[in-house]
């Protein structure tokens, strides 16, 4: 088999880049060992929040750029796939149920406001007017009215269908390694044999280091486990994403509320643990005591692809023909649209819509190594 570009991994990053390349008329094969979206991409909360996650700087700018693309991206995917992706506006709210955290929040709001972000400081009553299900102990909060959420499971499905309809070909099976001959990429070694390609995009999430032939330094991507518990509320208790200093709640329109998440260095042990559940359920009830009586209807865990500096790895590697769309850590859903646009542009040799230099794989060169 041969094609122009091979994508390794069909999570949100692999599918997003594949969609844009297929739309540009390029031959695309996406190789996925499981089913598209099966791993971190369907385990995510779906929060789209540059405000809560990042300090001003290039990463924050990347997040803001991606958020600004989201509404159009959701509309486009719904049009192409015929299915809803669960985009939900209304902003996100970070609350404090502890007097010590209230000044921390206010200071962060002032800093983000100076960086040009739309953010409002609320007292406890204001916060409860927005979300009556919040605890009477809520001391205050900050509200990011432009932020949103999506349903990652619906999103993964829609993105897969959209990429197929645009012409991308999906093939199931394990990629063993990236094939390099004469100093450049010539394809991949797949369990079904060699697939020849002029370019390869590594989008294997937390498993990226297991794909032989990547030119990343040891430890460039590692798994960080996150656990989630889902509660059912009828009628829905909350309507927008709520953060505290311990975690978050992500309400879906049907009344389900995702409670997340843990941040664990547990290798690839995909487990839901007593300690993990205790953490997410405790923070949920602290934010909204009415959740204490809500049934737990689902739990899961999966692996964020983390990098040593917390930034994604985007763009060309050292070997000609090798590209990266990995290391999205806690923000892969938020960063899907900008990753799709920027990495596909890099593969096509076109100017990228954002500067990828801060996210170049070469920044991760081992200390003392020549760049
Ligand atoms: C609990 C949790 C909550 C999260 N919440 C949020 C959130 O609210 N907002 C947000 O923006 N982000 C969130 N994230 C982060 C987000 O989910 C990830 O950053 C994102 O999904 C990464 O996408 P990906 O495509 O790189 O990885 P994945 O979705 O993991 O996809 C990688 C794919 O590659 C495949 N693969 C791996 N190796 C091979 C191989 N050798 N051959 C073939 N296929 C291979 C895998 O099967 C997998 O399908 C969360 C993550 C977790 C775990």
Image (tube, rainbow, N blue to C red):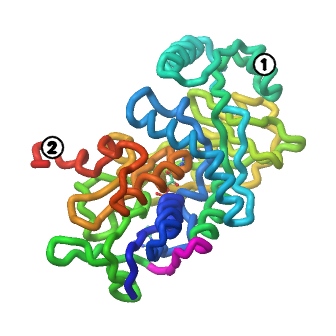
Q: Which residues are magenta?
A: 164-173
The numbered disc on residue 148 is none
Residue underneath mark 2: 367
351 or 180: which is nearer to us? 351
Residue underneath mark 1: 136
Query: Residue shown at 39%/30% (left/top)?
Result: 57
In the displayed structure, does residue 363 sit left or right of residue 23?
A: left
In the displayed structure, does residue 258 sit left or right of residue 132?
A: left
Q: Quadrant of the N terminus?
A: bottom left
26 or 88: which is nearer to us? 26
Image location (x, y in percent) of residue 320: 23, 65
Is 170 colored magenta in this rendering? yes
288 or 328: which is nearer to us? 328
Image location (x, y in percent) of residue 96: 64, 20
Q: Quadrant of residue 52?
A: top right
Query: Residue shown at 37%/82% (left/top)?
Result: 190
Q: Secondary structure at mark 2?
A: loop
- How many numbered marks have been drawn onto this rendered protein structure? 2
245 is higher (above) or lower (below) than 155: above
Query: Residue shown at 63%/70% (left/top)?
Result: 161
Which marked residue is nearer to the observer: mark 1 or mark 2? 2
Q: Residues within 10 Å of mark 2 (few under 14, many from 20)?
A: few
Query: Residue shown at 53%/34% (left/top)?
Result: 50
Image location (x, y in percent) of residue 302: 53, 56
17 is higher (above) or lower (below) than 64: below
Q: Secondary structure at mark 1?
A: loop
Is 328 colored magenta in this rendering? no
């Amino acid at each position: 088999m041969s094609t122009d570009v091979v994508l390794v991994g069909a999570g949100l990053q692999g599918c997003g880049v594949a969609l844009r390349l297929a739309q540009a008329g390029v031959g695309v094969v996406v190789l996925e060992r499981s089913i598209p979206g099966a791993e971190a991409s369907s385990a995510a909360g779906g929060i789209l929040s540059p405000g809560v996650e990042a300090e001003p700087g290039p990463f924050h700018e990347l997040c803001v750029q991606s958020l600004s693309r989201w509404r159009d991206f959701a509309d486009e995917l719904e049009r192409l796939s015929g299915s809803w992706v669960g985009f939900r506006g209304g902003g996100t709210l970070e609350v404090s149920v502890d007097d010590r955290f209230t000044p921390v929040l206010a200071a962060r709001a002032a800093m983000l406001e100076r960086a040009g972000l739309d953010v409002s400081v609320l007292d406890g009553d204001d916060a409860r007017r927005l979300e009556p299900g919040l605890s009477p102990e809520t001391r205050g909060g900050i509200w990011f009215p432009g932020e949103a959420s999506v349903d990652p499971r619906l999103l993964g499905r829609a993105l897969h269908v959209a990429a197929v309809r645009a012409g991308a070909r999906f093939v199931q099976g394990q990629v063993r390694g990236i094939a390099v001959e004469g100093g450049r990429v010539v394809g991949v070694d797949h369990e079904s044999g060699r697939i020849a390609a002029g370019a390869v995009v590594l989008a294997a999430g937390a498993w990226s280091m297991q794909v032989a032939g990547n030119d990343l330094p040891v430890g460039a991507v590692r798994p960080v486990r996150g656990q989630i518990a889902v509660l059912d509320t009828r009628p829905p208790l909350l309507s927008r994403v709520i953060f505290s200093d311990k975690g978050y709640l992500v309400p879906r329109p049907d009344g389900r509320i995702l409670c997340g998440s843990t941040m664990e260095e547990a290798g690839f042990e995909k487990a839901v643990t007593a300690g993990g559940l205790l953490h997410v359920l405790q923070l949920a009830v602290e934010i909204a005591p009415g959740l204490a009586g809500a049934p737990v209807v689902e739990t899961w865990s999966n692996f964020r692809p983390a990098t040593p500096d917390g930034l994604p790895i985007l763009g060309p590697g050292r070997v000609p023909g090798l590209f990266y769309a990995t290391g999205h850590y806690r923000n892969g859903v938020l960063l899907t649209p900008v990753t799709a646009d920027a990495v596909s542009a890099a593969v096509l040799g076109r100017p990228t819509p954002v500067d990828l230099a801060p996210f170049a794989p070469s920044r991760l060169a081992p200390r003392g190594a020549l760049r």
